[in-house]
Each structure stands twice: as C-alpha cells, then as structure tokens.
Image (cartoon, grey):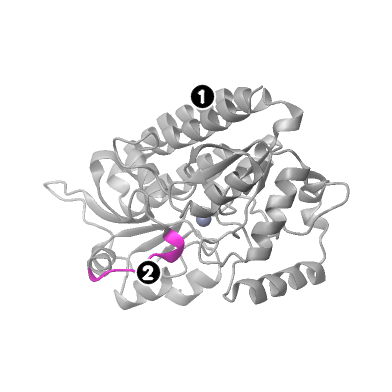
C-alpha cells in the first residue's frame, strides 16, 4: 500500500490509492478531477474533454508558489477521482491539502519522465560568461557543489527550495510528456473512455509539434547578441535550454524567495555591461522592481511573459498553446533585430 507521504517523497507517476474505479454505468457522469494550476488544467481539459469535470485550484494569473488552499479547494480534492499535479516541488502546499481532504483517488505527477533541470543560482558572475556550457555540464556536477549552492540559496531566501526547476511546462518537448502522463492517468481512472483520452492526446500532441516548429523558427532567428533577457523570477530555464537563451532574474525559482537590494544592483550592473536591451515583466509578479530596473538601465520593457499561469479568457495566453506562442512572439518582437 502506498502512503500519501511516499507519493510526494518519490515522484511516482500514478499511484492508485484505492480500487474504487468509477463504475462504468448507465448514464455516464463526467469523472471529477482536479488540476493544481491553470496551465496543467488546460492540458487536462484538452485531453479529458467532455468525460471529465475539472476543477483547477490556482486559476488564471494566480501564483502557485504562494497559493493558500481554501476550504472549497479541499472539498474539490476530497471529491476528485484523479488529482493532477506538476511535481518537482512546485506545489509545496499540496501534500497537506490532500491529507486534510482525505484524498483517496489517483495522483498523477505530470512531470514524471521529464529530464529535470537542476536548481542553480545564476547570480555568480563568470568571467567568460559561459553559462550555456555550464548548463550542459549539469550531469557532471558533483553532489558537493550542488549541495553548497543549495545551502547558500537557503540562507539567502530563508526557505526550503526544491532541488530541480519545476517550470518544466515551458519546454514543448516536456509538454508531450505531460500529455502522455495525463492521458494515462485518465485512462486508468476511467477505462471506459480510454480511447477518447488517447485520441485527444494525439490531437493535442500534433498541435504541440506544429507550434514547436513555429517557435523553433522564431527563436532560431534571434541575433546572437540578443539572446539574454531579464525576467522577474527564474521561470524560463527549460525554454532557455531549448533555445540557447539566457534568462536572468533577480528573484529565484520561486516567487516566495526574497530579492535583496544587492541582487538587483548586480543585475543592473550586468544589464549595463552586457548591453541587455529588453527586460520582461510577468503576469504573476509585482512588476515595480522590473520597472525600476528598466528605468535605471535604459532597457525597455519588452512585454509581458506568462510563466506560471495562463491569462484569463480574454487575455493573450488563455491556453497552454497560446501562452507559449505569445511568449515566443513577445520575445521575438522585442529582440529580433
Ligand atoms: Zn515560478
């Protein structure tokens, strides 16, 4: 028997907590499912379609890092057959919520099977500025080094931090893995509609692949000297790795972490030194800091990027696919020659 605690301790993909498989009954009821945040919720909706009744806990423009579950959230979780989470310690509040709600459905960790990017501070300045090389050497990092950085960060931010970058959805390749995990989770919970889930998955994956070829072209066309950008929090590591970009951020990988005046000053120095021409704001963060940085450096605000949440329905990033396209277009418009 797998305990709730162990699903959080390990990153097991699908754990069935009980054998209460929904009955394949006379009148089909959509199965109640919960997704933790809007980006994941959109993917689940796409694959579940009419066969699911979805509740998304952290809605559009919401910040999952600092979310505080409500009694209503607990009721949704209690009633859910499947709970979809990102994992990689993105939802630090979920374990307690699931326990409090006596959740006994299946838990699907959407990032299961991706290659996670190790958490790393971008703060230290390198003479040769070879941050890309450093990225590729992640696997060679010995434990000591990583441990030291981690401790250092903890001192800095004063709170526990995950070992890996949780923002894996910013890679379109990873989105395919999310889609696979979602479809498998729904098919297991609701075998009667398994074929529908797999068909929806295939349609969604085709859309992801088509979008990827557009984004590849846009990012591939960026000039070599315009590939460093600044965002408020460090949420674009997977996008940066996919497209040979460098994202600098005064705040760490969680919006919970505090920004020191020294961090901001160092970033301002770097923007001036490296002639970074545009900084970007995020829909979920307080942007006064970025406005201050833009004012002090003369960099322009290149637009709004969507990192951890979709926009509302009338916004430019109301679906996962629209979000990625919007971000790529915004970067391309601001940085392209
Ligand atoms: Zn984030």
Circle 1: is it few (<14), some (14-19), or many (20+) Cα within 10 Å?
few
Residue span colored magenta? 64-71
User: Between 191 and 317, which is closer to the camera in this rendering?
Assistant: 317
> For the image shown, how many numbered marks are present on the structure?
2
Q: Is residue 148 found left or right of 280 in the rendered image? A: right
User: Between 78 and 74, which is closer to the camera in this rendering?
Assistant: 74
- Quick one: SS at disc 1? helix
Mark 2 or mark 1, earlier in chain: 2
Q: Is residue 263 found left or right of 62 in the rendered image? A: right
Q: x, y (%) of residue 154?
A: 64, 74
Q: Quadrant of the N terminus?
A: bottom left
Q: Is residue 56 found left or right of 285 in the rendered image? A: left
Q: x, y (%) of residue 53?
A: 23, 50
Contact (CB < 8 A) between labels 2 and 1?
no
> Label 1 belongs to which residue?
210
Q: Residue at x 29, y 38 (%)?
A: 313
**Residue 228 lies in what quarter of the image?**
top right
Residue 220 visible in the snapshot: yes
Q: Is residue 250 found left or right of 47 in the rendered image? A: right
Q: CA distance from mark 2 to mark 1?
A: 37 Å
> Label 2 belongs to which residue?
17
Q: Which residue is most to the right?
A: 128
- Quick one: SS at disc 2? loop
Magenta stretch containing residue 67, yes or no?
Answer: yes
**Is the CB of mark 1 within 8 Å of ligand 1?**
no
Circle 2: is it few (<14), some (14-19), or many (20+) Cα within 10 Å?
some
Q: Residue at x 21, y 48 (%)?
A: 30
Tag of residue 67 = none
């Amino acid at each position: 028997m797998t305990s709730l605690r162990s699903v959080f301790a390990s990153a097991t993909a699908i754990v069935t907590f009980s054998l209460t498989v929904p009955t394949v009954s006379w009148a089909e009821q959509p199965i109640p499912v919960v997704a933790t945040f809007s980006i994941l919720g959109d993917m689940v909706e796409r694959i579940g379609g009419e066969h699911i009744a979805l509740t998304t806990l952290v809605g559009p423009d919401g910040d999952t890092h600092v979310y505080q579950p409500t009694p209503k959230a607990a009721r949704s979780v209690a009633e859910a057959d499947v709970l979809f989470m990102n994992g990689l310690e993105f939802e630090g509040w979920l374990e307690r919520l699931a326990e409090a709600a006596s959740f006994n459905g299946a838990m699907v960790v959407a990032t299961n099977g991706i290659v996670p990017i190790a958490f790393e501070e971008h703060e230290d300045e390198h003479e040769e500025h070879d941050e890309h090389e450093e990225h590729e050497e992640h696997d060679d990092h010995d434990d000591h080094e990583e441990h030291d950085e981690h401790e250092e960060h903890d001192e800095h931010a004063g709170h526990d931090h995950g070992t890996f970058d949780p923002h894996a959805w910013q890679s379109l390749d990873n989105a395919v893995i999310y889609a696979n995990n979602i479809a498998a989770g729904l098919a297991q919970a609701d075998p009667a509609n398994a074929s529908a889930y797999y068909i929806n998955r295939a349609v969604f994956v085709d859309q992801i692949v088509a979008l990827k070829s557009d984004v590849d072209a846009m990012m591939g066309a960026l000039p070599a000297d315009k590939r460093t950008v600044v965002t408020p929090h460090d949420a674009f590591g997977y996008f940066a790795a996919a497209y040979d970009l460098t994202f600098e951020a005064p705040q760490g990988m969680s919006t919970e972490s505090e920004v020191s005046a020294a961090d901001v000053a160092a970033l301002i120095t770097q923007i001036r030194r490296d002639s970074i021409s545009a900084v970007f704001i995020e829909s979920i963060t307080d942007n006064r800091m970025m406005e201050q940085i833009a004012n002090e450096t003369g960099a322009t605000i290149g637009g709004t990027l969507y990192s951890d949440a979709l926009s509302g329905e009338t916004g430019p990033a109301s679906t996962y696919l629209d979000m990625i396209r919007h971000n790529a277009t915004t970067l391309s418009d601001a940085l392209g020659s």
